[in-house]
Amino acid sequence: MGRLVMKFGGTSVANIDRIRNVARHVKREVDAGHDVAVVVSAMAGKTNELVDWCRDASPMHDAREYDAVVASGEQVTSGLLAIALQGIGIQARSWQGWQIPIKTSDAHASARILEIDGTEIVNRFADRKEVAVIAGFQGINPQTNRITTLGRGGSDTSAVAIAAAIRADRCDIYTDVDGVYTTDPRVVPKARRLDKIAFEDMLELASLGAKVLQVRSVELGMVHNMPVFVRSSFDKPEDIDPHGTPPGTLICSEEEIMESHVVTGIAFSKDEAQISLRQIEDKPGVAAAIFGPLADANINVDMIVQNVSEDGKTTDLTFTVPASDYNRARDTITASKGKIGYIRLDSATDVSKVSVIGSGMRSHAGVAAKAFKALSERNINIRAITTSEIKFSVLIDAAYTELAVRTLHTLYGLDQT
Ligand code: ADP
Ligand code: ASP
Ligand code: MG
């Protein structure tokens, strides 16, 4: 007998039929003798709708009220799943974030989990064999007593955090694909499912755009060494042997992975905007004058490229910010124009970032160089490049994203054969 967390994403609970399907997945594990805590997302599209309603009500809305609104999607699905489970004879109850409680910081809309008390859930496993159905994505700030949410995709993080809190043997993430692939299988049909992927590689894939897991959930998995298994909720519940190994991807520590490739996968993000400042003065303090105000405005700057000045007097500087922060970033820079002293500001929002990830890159030279050649042969212009030990990213025109991803996927031998 083991203890499991089962997390179901939006498409897995998209309507009452799908919720009944989830209930049968849960029943299978309960019947196999496991103690089960389930974490659910809102029905597919619900959170987007709630976010839009907040924007409609007021573009500059109070983040605390935004959280009160968007957390409601998960309240609905947790109650519905508890009802569906009871309907098939499984003892179950729903839990909202504040009831457990899942204590978080007060950073509304992107709160971090601070502490979870799993005692009551565990006691109920022992006393009543009760399944805990937990609303994902939400928590409560203990100082203000207000509902918080964990950022988009946050139910993954709720699931891994609950798994750590109740000392689960494994955290299963059920979604609409049957595992983590070498790149988004909806964009590259030749993408290959990975049997295992190291936390470190998964962390890079997630933070560089693969939305299959929220970044923070991978960090938590790594910190707590919690095995996270990504699998499909679309496999028929009755066809799965609860003691067998279903199709899926195990995210685990690097030592558990025997076979390793130089490149593990490719991620991309269209959520980028580029800002170039022309003819800034080439002197100490200019970078601080640019990036200081951006940091004060809580804008994350990602890629930065500064040209070497030709005349020793002026140079160009290019950087990227998330597309959602583009307007604020441009306004912030314009407001500091006097201090920075640039001649012209150019910008582009139709850009995307394509990233190649692999912990094997640490010990291999020339991995990135191959990509630059392959992209140039496709006439894809590279606007900016960043590299680190286990990944590199290129900024390109958004129209070439799919072509670039497919080209690199083939180049590094990731295509399914
Ligand atoms: P859920 O609603 O279950 O949380 P998400 O939509 O958040 O599901 O994440 C699953 C989606 O992630 C898939 O449908 C897939 O299109 C996308 N995805 C992006 N990159 C990858 C990848 N490398 N492997 C698998 N899925 C990926
Ligand atoms: N429902 C939330 C979202 O759409 C959380 C999640 O699905 O993980 O972002
Ligand atoms: Mg998700």
Image (tube, rainbow, N blue to C red):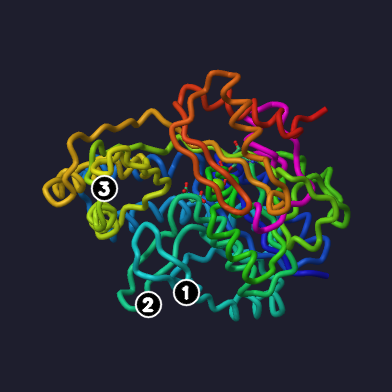
Element type at mark 1: strand
Asked if residue 17 shows in the view, the reply is: no
The answer to whether mark 2 and mark 3 are in CB contact below 8 A is no
**Residue 341 coordinates in the image, percent (x, y):** 16, 45
- List the residue tagged with mark 1: 114
Horizontal placement of 63 versus 173: left or right?
Answer: left
| Residue that mark 3 sits on | 282
Asked whether 80 or 245 is in front, the reply is: 245
- Tell me the crowding category of disc 1: few under 14, some 14 to 19, or many 20 or more residues within 10 angstroms, Cα based: some
Residue 48 visible in the snapshot: yes
- CA gap between label 2 and label 1 equals 10 Å
Residue beneath disc 2: 142
Circle 3 packing at 10 Å, graded few (<14), some (14-19), many (20+), is some
Determine the residue positioned at 58% across, 25% down.
375
Amino acid under disc 2: Pro
The kind of secondary structure the magenta stretch mainly shows is loop
